[in-house]
Image (cartoon, rainbow, N blue to C red):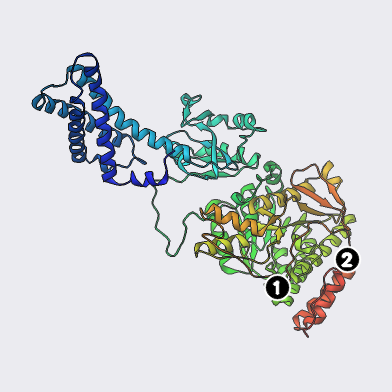
Amino acid sequence: MLAPTLRRSLARRPVILLADAVLAALAAGAASLPEVAWFGVPASVLPVRMAGTAAIAAIVLAALGVPRDSWRHGGTVEMARAAGGAIAAAILGSLAAHLALPHPPRPGTIALLLLFLPSLLIGARGLYRLSLLVSVRRDPEAAPVLLAGAGDHAELLLRALERQSGARYRIVGMLSVDPALVGQRLHGTPVLGSLGDVTLVLDRLAGTGDAPAAIAVASRAISGLSLTQLRAAAETRGLPLFEVPRPSDLRPRRPHRRREDAPTDPQALLDRPEMPIDRASIAAVSRGKRVLVTGAGGSIGSELVRQIAEAGPAHLTLLDNGEYALYAIDMEIGVAHPRLAREAVIGDIRDRERIAALFARSRPELVFHAAALKHVPLVEANPLEAVLTNAYGTRNVADAAVSVGAEAMVLISTDKAVNPTSVMGATKRLAEMYCQGLDLRTKDAKNPTRFVTVRFGNVLGSTGSVVPLFQAQLARGGPLTVTHPDMVRYFMTTKEAVSLVLLAMATMVQGGAVAETVERGAIFVLDMGKPVRILDLARKMIRLAGLRPEVDVKITFTGLRPGEKLYEELFHGREEVVPLEIAGLLVARPRVVDLAIVARAMDEAAAAAREGREKPALAILSVMVPEFAAPHGGT
């Protein structure tokens, strides 16, 4: 292992030239030793030949530009130039010795010099590069990755990972486009199978220390059916599918960014793979149905729209009160699914008559209610807006769904509705209570509308969440702001959360043994794994950007904001958890309040909110949600 000072020295041309001259002298001495030992040539010829060969080698190598070639990054061309220079130096040195010295070298000596001199120059460079590889620090927690593609693109990636200390990925095997490469090794990494063997390879690695945490595509030749098979295999096992960027692709440099490699993939921030999802079930529930999504332009709503559109519904209605967000998702779906019948509607769920008219016209069979005000500090500053949107707006959507005989409605809820300390959490809990009451009331109806409430925690990368905030702060060079060192949250990727929401809907709509075990009014809760400390998340994002926490990027603590808790809960103490035979889904037995009482409370709170009377509106909220203590003050 070379010391850092020696490495820095070998990056300078004079030092490289001197090193090559010394190696040339050693080669000349070694080649001449047999003459001295066996043929009576005086030993005094050794220093003369060594000095002469060193001088000639220095001149020849300098003329060929060999000292300008990096020992660290040199490749085949650089090695060939060094070898050619060494051979030329050996020939010229031997010729000069024949002309100028009383004891010219014998043919055997010249042959040895032609062997030793190139070997020493190339060998020294090889040993230097080997020392660099030995000194690379391997991260014991590097995520194992299965690489799809075993060509030049993959070779560049493997070479880069070999040289990078602390690389967060390690390649455990490859899948080749060319079946003839199966069984071979590339930089020590085995080609485990062809692309069509992806399922077999994943099964073989499952349960071992090399079980992949992701699949990475490293070939432009992988497309169409092959790419579809890879994506299906990844989704079945809950693995993210990455694409290895091509080093030959150039892109404009973004101004004012500190690091280009700040992490953008939310899955990389989770310490667990995504849940394996039954894609066939969630596709079947929406296929051929009329579907309406509220909040369609938001983080959850837009992902709902994408996954529902993939299933092929008969008609898809996108509802949002934000013009640009609605425009963006509508355009995206139009490009991806040009034949899908759809309608983009600008509307406010607080407008009861408008919502009723929209439902009467579109007559949705499935309703996904994602519209809500979710940013806790902003809602604390504007509590009456949350009463009107999160609580009363939910009632408008739910009543409209019942009026048109919708098959089912999903309410997207939040872990902040459990023992809420914020207006946002309390209003979402009131919305849960109303949908639970409706689910119980419609039990005996001729065509009952099922209400499926799904509760989960934070979504990585969603609008206004902590990950985009940290990314923006990293781009500015820091500091990263954390409210409290002990704050923890549950996290899930948007795609995973939405898939499980659709799975919950599919479970109830399709019926069967599992659905029979779920009581009416029950709340589905997504299994989000272990909670994550926000401080640990900040440190991980800094490391993933190639920086050091508290050294390159500072972390500062700003204090809890209004309405925030140090930790969130997925279940209330009075909600009994019932296990399901579905990975990723839990269910809580209902704790319900009479629907008429909830409806009257919503009407009174909404009336007070419309009149700008904050104190009575929040007082009603605290009565209906006893865990919530309404803030003092207001009118």
The amino acid pointed to by label 2 is Leu
User: Residue shown at 76%/70% (left/top)?
Assistant: 422
Name the spot of residue 335 as percent of width and height, x first.
Answer: 52, 54
Residue furthest to the bottom in view is 635
Q: Is residue 118 above or below residue 380?
A: above
User: Residue shown at 29%/41% (left/top)?
Assistant: 16
In the image, 110: left or right of 187?
left
SS assignment at label 2: helix
The residue labelled by disc 2 is: 595
User: Which residue is nearer to you in this view: 494 or 313?
Assistant: 494
Gap in angstroms between the C-alphas marked 2 and 1? 26 Å
Asked if one can make out residue 546 in the rendered structure from this viewpoint, the answer is yes
- Which of the 4 image quarters holds residue 275? top right
Q: Is residue 386 above or below residue 485?
A: below
Question: Quick one: quadrant of the C terminus?
Answer: bottom right
Choose mark 2 or mark 1, whichever is in front.
1
